[in-house]
Amino acid sequence: MAQSASSVGKTPDSCTQALTAFSLGQTVRVTTDTGRTLDYEPDRAGMCASMLTNHPDWTAQGIGEIDDKVRAGKEVPRVFRQAQSGPKRTDGAPLDKVLNALQAVGRVTRKGRQYRTKCPYHGGKTLASLSVTETADGTALIHCFSGCAADDILGAVGLTLGDLFMPVSDEDRQKEESEAIAALIGERPLFRVLPDSLIRLAEVEPETVDWLWRGYIPLGKITMLEGDPGLGKSMLTLNLTGTVTGKNKWLPDGSLTEVDGGVVIVSLEDGLGDTIRPRLDAIEGADLKRIYSLAEVDDGQGDKRPISLPDDLYQIRAAIKKVNAKLVILDPLSAMLDAKHNINSDQDVRRALAPLAILAGDTGCSILILRHLGKQGERSAVYRGAGSIGVIGAARAGLLVAKSPDDPDHERIFSQTKSNLGRPMPSLSYRIKESIENGVGYVVWGGVSDYSADQLVNQRADEAPALAEAVAFLRSLLADGPVAADHGQEAAKEAAIAPATLKRARRRPCGPYRRFRYGRRLGLVVTDSTC
């Protein structure tokens, strides 16, 4: 039987009429303040009621025919009670409460799952003008075949719309409201903005950035160190460990640091006895009494398991506090993320590293994370780390180690990929030497390098020796002055240097040569003989 659409007003009337329409099995059409219309079936009654409660300027209207499922008394999801429904009732089921009130004013008969009686609001001659049923979740449904509104019917026997529904606790009410609103706006949680959540920036005191290594590694932040295996990433971090814990405070670029404290090493690749301890012994001034390892934790069953992020952050926090750590080394990141966080997922990575960033800020400790490079082709260095871009996005500083194009067999370059807190810093060269005493490798720093991180990651491993040969050829060719371009190309051909390799050598940051025009001929000249 078709029902005429009932016009409604604003909250609380709009919500009341919407609930009445749902009780009749009707679809409810909500009109927002911008004119947008949203249709809700009875199985979305909770969401609709929540939206109308939170938006007093929206209107609702019941449309369509009575749902046969409602007629049959089948399940309609629970609608949580609104504030205007009156106090919560805990005495008896809603159906019993409604039937008791109706029996006080007239005779009630039962037919299957339905109860029939005379409508107490409009009266009339028919003894079965009002139908009452119960859903699977305990909600009482009432329907007047003459079209009386549910709130009018209930008001005639001293009840409210809230008496049709099972009691709901404040906690369940808030949860259901949040879920209903989140479903409407696209699965995004909606929270009420409290006054304490708003911060006036005029009341925020400006702070200066503290540095473990000025320009490269900030205190209280995450720093990412990336590079291919075998280039000395772990040795570089241990070199910094000696500076933080020891009396020698000189840094590789010739600056001094005032940072003094303990170090926590979380390494899941290198052994303590055969790798980390011997390397620390080779570092002059490292105070081993202030350096601690935290690679394993108790699994709760008497055994040990590798540390896992972010679940074991409390273990790292406790270690930082215990040893007054100023540096935490995580090596490597991919081995520490738990199975619930995929390193290739931007959302997973950010959820895992956000608590780590908070930990760094709370403790004022530098957290240095090591990560391998991916196998991507030529692209910016900031995108070359293995996994999601969210990894480097969580860090405030990014560092890279790579082979030197000039001497790929022996020289390495330490460069910067990201700096959110300071100016870009120059790249530095270093070599790995072998200790005479125990044969363990250690780092020997060189000078400033002109190679940028982007240039280092975009060099191909198989062409690095050829590129170095082309650079040496050009320097020799142009040592006595400029030469004609065609003469240089012929000489390169005789030296078995490919034109593409010659072109790449010309694009190096310090030359080694540039083109210039004299007369009608194009010549070459060295740009900087000291490069």
Image: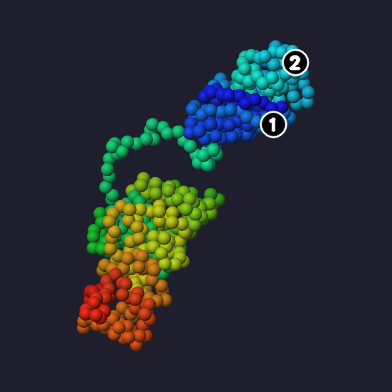
Residue 324: % across, % down: 34, 50
Q: Is the N terminus in the top left, top right, bottom left or bottom right quadrant? A: top right
Vertical arrangement, residue 477 with respect to residue 101, above or below: below
Q: Which mark is residue 126?
A: 2
Residue 77: % across, % down: 64, 33
Asked whether, in this view, residue 98 is left or right of residue 326, the answer is right
Crowd tier of the residue under label 2, counting other residues whose Cα lies within 10 Å: few below 14, some 14–19, many 20 or above: few
Q: What amino acid is labelled 2 in the image?
A: Thr
Q: What amino acid is labelled 1 in the image?
A: Asp
Residue at image position (50%, 41%) is 188
Secondary element under disc 2, as helix, strand or loop, is loop
Q: How far is the residue under mark 2 from the one under mark 1?
A: 23 Å
Crowd tier of the residue under label 1, counting other residues whose Cα lies within 10 Å: few below 14, some 14–19, many 20 or above: some
The quarter of the picture where residue 409 lies is bottom left
Task: Depth check: give the residue in front, 509 or 24.
Answer: 24
Vertical arrangement, residue 24 with respect to residue 349, above or below: above
Task: Depth check: give the residue in front, 529 or 487.
Answer: 487
Q: Which mark is residue 67?
A: 1
Q: Residue furthest front?
A: 520
Vertical arrangement, residue 490 with respect to residue 312, above or below: below
Residue at image position (38%, 54%) is 395
